[in-house]
Image: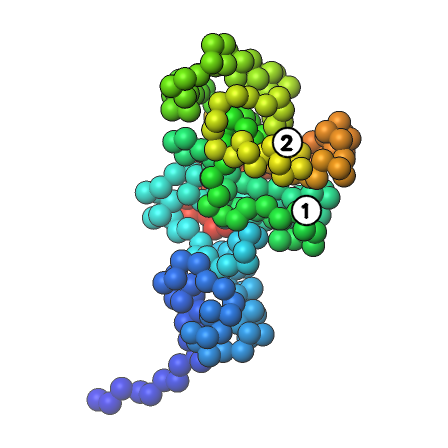
Amino acid sequence: MLERKVKTVRALERGLDVLLEVQARRAVSLHELHQALNLPKATLLRMLLTLGRKGLIWQRLADGAYLPHLGAAARAAGSAVEQIAEIASPYMKALSTKVAWPSVLSVPRLDHMEILETNSPLFRLDSAILGPVGVKLSYIHTATGRAYLAACDENERDAIIARLRPRDASPGSEEDLRAILKETRERGYALREPMHPWPDRSKQLVLRDGRRSMAVPIMVGGAPIATINLTWPAKRGTDEGVMLRHLEALHQTAQAVGRAVAAQSAAPGKGASGI
């Protein structure tokens, strides 16, 4: 008996081609998809939007790249840190509509914080350029690092400080750092000031970039998994003024991301579109 000839759905085929290309490359731009698949960019954008709404892909704010959604199997094998950029991205986009200055999302590594996402491309200001993804930030000299160090438990904090402590650390310098972190913990947010003498990465950049920054931790289960900051040019606003206007929005965003990460972990089959 001859098989009946059944026509394929061409639009579905092309949509699957786009999805497979994103999955194969792990991160891909619209132009790269256009070159690889020879499809009009307008068509690709419609397909990408549809795939995004179905929770199969997501678009990173930092560079506009399209990435595959982290599936249930990958989530089970990994940790909340591996999916936090995908989860946090829409919240950071929403924050950009409320606050005049950009933010970065960062996670802890052994001796530094690493940027996973930033909404700075949404701001058309030279002073708003942060990142890019992968940049290593100081635990000691950035608000981002201090927010995490202040929020983590004592054992983790001790381990990080031990990695950062220079061999010729001046007497009392570690006590000064711990006092800064204690003050940060008590007030609930971190600043770059006061400066600290240890020559950890980013110190010279912080001294000369003319920016101010505040940061708060993203908490899940009572422990920090990441931090989110807000950065602005020092000449455009005092710490007190910016905090008065925007600290609450920053806290709300961090809390929303933390709840979303916790919910995602509790329901591993739920896609990013369910946030």
Picture quadrant of residue 18: bottom left
Query: Does residue 56 appear in the picture of this structure?
Result: no
Q: Nearer the viewer, mark 1 or mark 2?
A: 1
Q: Decide: is 198 above or below 271.
A: above
Residue tagged by mark 2? 214
Picture quadrant of residue 144: top right
- Describe residue 24's horizontal placement relative to residue 228 as left or right: left
Instruction: Residue at 59% x, 46% y: name it.
Output: 130
Q: Are marks 1 and 2 in contact (CB under 8 Å)?
A: no
- Residue 117, given in percent of the width and then of the height, sits at 53, 46
Instruction: Residue at 47% x, 70% y: name it.
Output: 33
Which residue type carries mark 1? Ser
Instruction: Residue at 21% x, 89% y: name it.
Output: 1
- Residue 61, given in percent of the width and then of the height, sits at 57, 53
Which residue type carries mark 2? Met
- Residue 76, given in percent of the width and then of the height, sits at 35, 42
- Tell me the SS state at disc 1: helix
Q: Earlier in the sequence, mark 1 or mark 2?
A: 1
Numbered label attached to residue 232:
none
Residue tagged by mark 1? 127
Query: Does residue 153 appear in the picture of this structure?
Result: yes
Badge 1: residue crowd in 10 Å (few <14, some 14–19, many ≥20): some
